[in-house]
Image (spheres, rainbow, N blue to C red):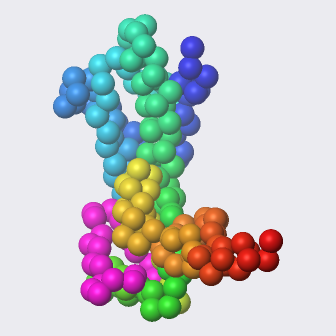
Amino acid sequence: MSRIGIKPVQIPQNVEVRIEEKSNLGGQKIIVKGPLGEISKDLRKEIKVSIEKEVVVLKRMKNTKMAKSLYGLYRTLISNMIEGVVKHFEKHLELVGIGYRAELKGNELSLKAGATHPYVVKAPEGISFEVNDKINLTIRGIDKQEVGQIAAYIRSLSKPEPYKGKGIRYKDEYVRRKPGKAAKAAEGASE
């Protein structure tokens, strides 16, 4: 039995949760509306969702391996949806290196990150960018998965390299450094 799936999800005062019986996946559709926006998710038919006394409760309809794996997943997704419409999810990135900088032009992010041309990333609906000091970037949104996905995409444009540490990295990410050829040669000569 899933230890996460059996926990009910509390609904805060300023959040409205609706359940529609038909979805694209054959099950239900859950819609969460709060002060920061509205988000919805289609659920599979193996899981049944109900609202009882300001609490969202999940129930497995079948006892298959797929239903067991979806039970805890859907509970976490619904919890993240409720949390996202109350307060934004955030990812913080920093640009490290000479000439690495970010600029915000409307809802487009222009990144100069070691290439001959700037990378331009358009903010998807529900996502906002904030640039501080031209090297610190904050990504905000109500959908946790989408915020993480866009942050991973921006990081992939110029991953931190292990020799000088240049690139785009998460705020608290540790980049393991390697010695260069000169350091290796000097180390070998001294032995």
Give me the residue at 57% from left, 14% from top. Answer: 1
Q: Per the image, is 126 magenta? A: yes
Residue 182 counted in the magenta span: no
From the top left corner, tell me how far across and down residue 87 is, in percent: 51, 59
Find the magenta span and give its range.
113-132
Residue visible at 36% across and 63% down? 153
- Camera-side residue: 176 or 125? 176
Task: Between residue 30 and residue 159, name the one nearer to us.
Answer: 159
> Relative to 20, is 186 above or below?
below
The answer to whether one can see residue 36 in this image is no
Q: Write down the quadrant of residue 109 in the picture.
A: bottom left
The image shows residue 23, relative to residue 142, as above or below, that is above
Residue 20 drawn at (x, y percent): 26, 30
Measured as percent of width and height from the top left, residue 191 is found at 80, 71
Q: Quick one: which residue is furthest to the right in this view?
A: 191
Above-or-below relation of 27 to 171: above
Which residue shows up at 42% across the image and 60% down it? Answer: 152
- Residue drawn at x 44%, y 52% as measured from the top left: 144
